[in-house]
Amino acid sequence: ILIIFLFLFIFSIILMNRELLNRSSNFIDNISKKYNYFLKEIKIDGVKFIDKSHIQTYFKQYKNKSIFFIPIQEISSSIRGDNWINSVKISSNYRDTILVEITESLPIGIYNNGHQNILFNNKFEVLEIINKNNSLFNSLITFKGNSSIIASEVFFENIPVNFTSYIKEAIYINNRRWDLILRNNILLKLSENNIIKSLQNYDKIYKNFSKQELLDIESIDLRITEKAILKFKINTND
């Protein structure tokens, strides 16, 4: 341990002088060889959505090179440039291992533009284009309509958190108001100016209808305060 601290002290002095650093690179490399101070392992913590192999590519050119020559700050800056990354901390054991601790951006919605499914985060930044069958993001709301990503910020402010899990799609109508398709396939037409009141009216209907009766509902128009217009599915067996 004393050798490591001594070496780090000498190394910090060398860093202050670029010319001395250039002259000493061979010396440092020889010390690294003598004590086997080469990058062998990269540990990555905190990732759920990002493929670890993507983070490892930032260190590929430094594998089996001196642990003291890994440009940690430079790599950190590069990794932070990815919208998936909320924060990153990189540390070294100054022997053979680099630890990368990542906090990912939180994906909160999918924007469908008619051609692609675009995943976006809680800062309303685009993360990536995903396959429509990607089960990892099935619980997220799919947004449709022009400017719906921008409008979704106000949307989330007005929708109760415990209700978002019931929403399958949110469709922005004429840049003014929202239609919701719930996971029970009921279409809700919400008020332009009072989303919360619309949802409260839906809650009253939900509590007063049986599950079977809810299955018979095609849509509920809640655009008028204190009024709900129900449209039932046509039963072809009648």
Image: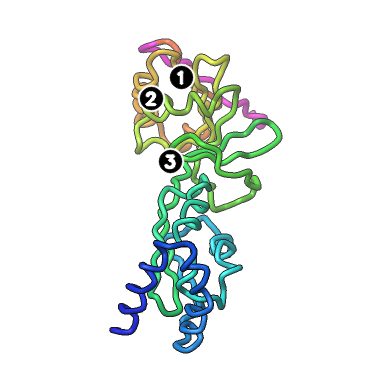
For the rendered model, the colour scheme is rainbow
Q: How far apart are labels 2 and 3 at the CA level? A: 14 Å
Q: Amino acid at mark 2?
A: Leu
Position of residue 30 measured from the top left corner of the image (x, y, whole percent) = 51, 84
Query: Residue 199, labelled with which disc?
Result: 2
Q: Residues within 10 Å of mark 3 (few under 14, many from 20)?
A: few
Position of residue 124 measured from the top left corner of the image (x, y, whole percent) = 48, 34
From this view, report whether residue 10 is shown above or below residue 2: above
User: Which residue is nearer to you in this view: 126 or 9?
Assistant: 9
Magenta stretch contains residue 151? no
For image coordinates 41% across by 51% down, the residue present is 87
Q: Which residue is mark 1?
A: 190
The residue segment tinted magenta is 225-238
Q: Earlier in the sequence, mark 3 or mark 1?
A: 3
Residue 200 in view (yes/no): yes
Q: Earlier in the sequence, mark 2 or mark 1?
A: 1
Q: Amino acid at mark 1?
A: Leu
For image coordinates 53% across by 24% down, the residue present is 219
Count the numbered circles shown. 3
Position of residue 225 measured from the top left corner of the image (x, y, whole percent) = 38, 11
For image coordinates 52% across by 23% down, the residue present is 179
Mark 2 and 1 residues: CB-CB less than 8 Å, in contact?
yes
Q: Which residue is mark 3?
A: 165
Q: Quadrant of the N terminus?
A: bottom left
Prevailing secondary structure class for the magenta stretch in the rendered image: loop
